[in-house]
Each structure stands twice: as structure tokens, then as C-alpha cells.
Image (cartoon, rainbow, N blue to C red):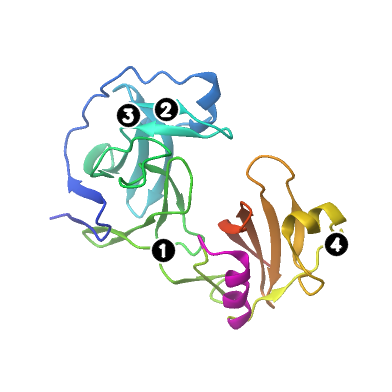
Amino acid sequence: MLQVASDLGDYAFVPLRRLPRSPEKGVLDEYCSGYRPTKLSPLARSVESAGWIVMSEAPLGRFHVVTFASGFDPGTSALCFARNANLAVFDGPALVALAYAKRPYRGPDDSENPIPLGRVESLEDGTGLLVWTDPPGVPVGELHVSGERLRLTARSPVHAYCRGEASAPDIYGRPITFARRILLARGWQPHRPAEVPDDLDRLLGDTDADTVELEACSGTGDGYCNWSYRTKAAQLHVITVGEDHTVSSYGVECDRR
């Protein structure tokens, strides 16, 4: 018998056999249109036929995971806030489990309630799915399968990449100054970009002469900056956001052999 569990106190994960209809029509306006994938599987289209707006989908072993919401509220900086967001797990065409925030989120000023679940993406080492919130912040956790057990967990502290030749620690939500120390301790070295950033990039990145890994910064919006690190087997691309340069995403690119 399939077992489901959540280690995340703010998010429920329960067995479910029937997908409920959306409480609203699920109309997506132009401002939030980018939250819906351009291509949907037949399974995702069946979710939309129940009035939901699909945000993402991904395979997980024999299962297929679809995230969806009933609608979106537009915010600032091109962000949208999902209403009634869910994560559904299917075994073939059959729904088997549903995950969702236990308490309703009231918007960007609501610090007491959990942010709704958002998109999922396959972890680069193939061990499960990374689960994001919506609007995107840092991933809230991971979804794993082992035999007949599905589990929502906290993010793993480290993942292996490139056939085990490289490993990257979890640095989501860390200021780049702190993340840099973690990376250096694990053997990642600052990688100087081919095109040296100009004075404005360095000013926005708030870097000193020893910080050679800054690639570029955005002078508008949320102030995104790109940073790069290397090991013998791979390159690590890091994106930070805000004045404190908090890590919002990162990815490993394995060297070709």
C-alpha cells in the first residue's frame, strides 16, 4: 500500500483518489501568463479540465507530479501570487496523493502563514524533485520516492553531480559571502568570467578585488547577480537577489568528456 508523509510542518501531504474541481474558473490574465508552461502532457491537460491552472509537471520514478492553482493575484516586480495551490502525484492516470499549505496565504505582507507550493523540477542528481513556493523564493523542500513511500522532506544538505565527481552544498537563502565560504570549503574555486564585469556590475555586486567570480548584475528590478565557481569536473552557476545578495538559485554544469 502506498504511504505518503510530510516532514514539513506547514504543508500537508495526504492520500487522495479524486481530484476536486477548482473553486474558480482558473482564468490566467496576461500579466501572470508566464506561470503556465507552454507545453502540457495529457495528464496535465486533464488537471486543467477540472478548472485548475497548471504551473509545472515532472516525472518521479513511476509517478508523475503536477502542480496547479485556481488563480493568481498580480504583484510587483512581475511576481504573481498563487491561490489554492496544490501538488498532485499520479500513478499512471490515477491520482494517489495531494500536498498543499495547511493555512491560507494572504499575500506579501503575510509572514505568519506558509507561501503556497509552486513548481517542481527534477534534481540534477536524479534523486527526487525540488519543490518551490509561489511566488518563487527559495525551494521549500524536496519530494522523494522509495518503493511504496512518497515523502516531502527538507532540502538535502548536499547533492552529488557529474557521476559523483562533484558535489554541491545547499546554499539557498544564504548571503553570497556566507555561501562562498561553504563552497570554498567543499573544493569549489572562484571562476573568473571570460568577460570582466564593468565598474557598475562590481558596484552593484558590492565586491572587493579578491572576488573574481562575479559575472554581471542587473541594475533594475530585484537586483539579480550571477556568480561562477569551478571544480575539476564542473562549473557552478549561482544567482543572487537583493541588496544582501541572497542565493535564489544555482545549477551545476558538468564538463564534457
Q: Quadrant of the image for the N terminus?
A: bottom left
Alpha carbon distance from label 1 to label 4? 33 Å
42 vs 7, nearest the viewer: 7
Q: Residue furthest left?
A: 1
Q: Secondary structure at mark 3?
A: helix
- Left or right, 141 with respect to 183, comes to left
Q: Earlier in the sequence, mark 1 or mark 4?
A: 1
Which residue is under mark 2?
Answer: 72
Q: Position of residue 146 (x, y in %)?
A: 28, 63
Alpha carbon distance from label 4 to label 2? 40 Å
Closest to the camera, between mark 4 and mark 2, is 2
Give the amino acid at mark 2.
Phe
Magenta span: 172-185
Give the amino acid at mark 1.
Thr
Q: Earlier in the sequence, mark 4 or mark 3?
A: 3
Which residue is under mark 3?
Answer: 47
Q: Which mark is residue 127?
A: 1
Q: Earlier in the sequence, mark 3 or mark 2?
A: 3
57 w.r.t. 231: above or below: above
192 w.r.t. 242: above or below: below
Give the amino acid at mark 4.
Ala
**Which residue is located at x 77 percent, y 58 percent?**
215
Closest to the camera, between mark 1 and mark 4, is 4
Please tell me in which quadrant of the rendered image residue 115 appears.
top left
Give the amino acid at mark 3.
Val
Q: Earlier in the sequence, mark 4 or mark 2?
A: 2
Which residue is under mark 4?
Answer: 194
Q: Position of residue 76 (x, y in %)?
A: 55, 32
**Local crowd size for mark 2, using a 10 Å CA cut-off: few (<14), some (14–19), many (≥20):** many
